[in-house]
């Protein structure tokens, strides 16, 4: 099958893509079923991703990163997600949900203290927005920050936080005044070992089983004023920027899921026989494969279009980011679903990649803004552009 993943990449980006593909096919693909059964992402794979500069992503070299452009970074995330979404997330977070706020609002001192070790893979971080009663409606978050001279005191609860139990620090969004809505929201870098923080793992998940997710309880946590990111009340802008980059990351991850599922379905359709023929020669199977290719290729094109906007200007263009996130997440879901269908009963077994990719696909339609939230953003932008 022609490899369309090269599309729109220059020679340097294509060289990087080949190196990532080689790493994934040599080191990840043969082990991914086994380590998912065992329930942990092997440290040596993370180390290798760090040494290849994948974790450094778009963070500039002066802040410990690899200084990639967004097109190259999304392509790396896609290549890794063909087989392992957990490793793709490790590559994605520093440049997106976790590091984007520090990159754009951090002081030099904050960048050197918090961003550099994360970009180098020496530390892990989390971003805590979601609360038990505030998900899509993030502006209604209730975690309270009370100013006391040279420090703030944070109290509240967060949930469904990636890396909550394994991070060195977390970017916590709190409000100085719940009656102020978005205007009260302020961002803080909170060190994980601060007194008053308890985290609890969320287990038995449909997706993301080998990645940490947890609840966070903040009970009178003292945060020095120098750990406030941006100005008081500037948190909403930081939140939008963090989640915006997160959406680009999730969109790229979704293309990887779709691509990996499509390749596996095609290979299986060529080897499996029914009614005396390869199932790949049955027209109803061909129709599924054709629809899977359309979904995957269009999703990739949209992700590259959105990435180009991020390379043009900080924060990209939320119209293209949301189009890419919505379409790619749906594509991942559709393609992974049809890949299981083409595998018949074998698609139900965790011995094959399609079962895992099917479970991972669902998550992409929820995290960093559900499909419905992307639809609302696209419609709002269309109204503004009309
Ligand atoms: C594995 C995993 C990891 C995560 N990691 C993080 C993390 O690191 N940090 C973090 O802060 N959060 C994280 N989240 C949380 C995630 O971002 C939220 O789940 C997501 O924003 C949706 O919020 P919710 O689950 O509360 O759903 P809700 O907001 O309660 O939505 C429920 C349903 O209502 C729909 N809905 C809501 N509002 C509207 C509307 N206005 N119009 C139409 N439909 C609407 C939604 O689309 C959805 O279908 C994670 C979640 C998962 C599953």
Image (cartoon, helix red, strand yellow):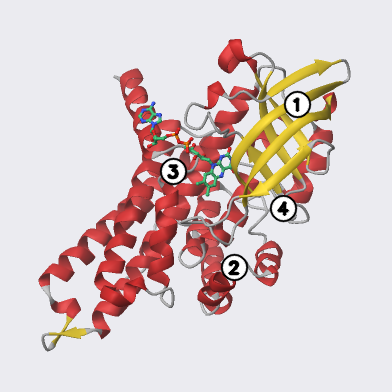
Q: CA distance from mark 3 to mark 1?
A: 27 Å
Q: CA distance from mark 2 to mark 1?
A: 33 Å
Give the image location of residue 79, x and y in percent: 49, 63
Residue at 44% of width from left, 38% of height from top?
321
Would you name the residue on which mark 4 appears? 166
Q: Which circle, 3 or 1, is nearer the viewer?
A: 1
Would you name the residue on which mark 3 appears? 366
Q: CA distance from mark 4 to mark 1?
A: 20 Å
On residue 182, the disc is none
Q: CA distance from mark 4 to mark 3?
A: 22 Å
Image quadrant where one finds the N terminus: bottom left
Q: Look at the numbered disc 2 and give the secondary structure of its residue.
A: loop
**Quick one: which residue is furthest to the right in this view?**
150
Q: Is mark 1 within 8 Å of ligand 1?
A: no
Residue 311 seen in the figure: no
Relative vertical location of residue 41 with respect to residue 216 in this rendering, above or below: below
């Amino acid at each position: 099958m022609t490899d369309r993943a090269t599309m729109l990449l220059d020679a340097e980006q294509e060289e990087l893509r080949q190196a990532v593909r080689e790493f994934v096919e040599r080191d990840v693909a043969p082990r991914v079923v086994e380590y998912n059964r065992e329930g942990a992402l092997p440290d040596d794979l993370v180390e290798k991703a760090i040494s290849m500069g994948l974790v450094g992503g778009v963070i500039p070299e002066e802040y410990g990163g690899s200084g990639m452009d967004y097109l190259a970074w999304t392509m790396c995330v896609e290549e890794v997600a063909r087989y392992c979404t957990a490793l793709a997330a490790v590559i994605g977070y520093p440049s997106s949900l976790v590091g984007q706020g520090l990159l754009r609002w951090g002081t030099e001192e904050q960048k050197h203290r918090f961003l550099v070790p994360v970009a180098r893979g020496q530390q892990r971080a989390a971003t805590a927005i979601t609360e038990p009663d505030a998900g899509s409606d993030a502006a209604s978050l209730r975690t309270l920050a009370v100013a006391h001279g040279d420090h703030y005191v944070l109290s509240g609860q967060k949930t469904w936080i990636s890396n909550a139990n394994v991070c060195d620090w977390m970017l916590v969004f709190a409000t100085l005044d719940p009656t102020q809505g978005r205007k009260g929201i302020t961002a803080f870098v909170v060190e994980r070992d601060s007194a008053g923080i308890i985290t609890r793992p969320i287990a038995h998940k449909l997706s993301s089983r080998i990645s940490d997710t947890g609840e966070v309880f903040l009970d009178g946590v003292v945060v020095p004023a120098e750990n406030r990111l941006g100005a008081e009340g500037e948190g909403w802008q930081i939140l939008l920027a963090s989640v915006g980059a997160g959406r680009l990351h999730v969109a790229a991850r979704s293309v990887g899921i779709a691509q990996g599922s499509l390749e596996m379905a095609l290979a299986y359709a060529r080897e499996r026989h029914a009614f005396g023929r390869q199932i790949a020669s049955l027209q109803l199977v061909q129709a599924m494969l054709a629809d899977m290719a359309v979904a995957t290729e269009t999703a990739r094109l949209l992700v590259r279009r959105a990435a180009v906007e991020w390379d043009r200007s900080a924060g990209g263009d939320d119209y293209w980011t949301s189009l890419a996130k919505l379409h790619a997440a749906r594509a991942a879901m559709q393609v992974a679903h049809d890949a299981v269908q083409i595998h018949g009963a074998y698609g139900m077994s965790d011995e094959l990649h399609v079962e895992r990719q099917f479970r991972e696909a669902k998550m992409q339609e929820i995290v960093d803004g559900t499909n419905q939230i992307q639809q609302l953003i696209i419609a709002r932008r269309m109204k503004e552009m009309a």
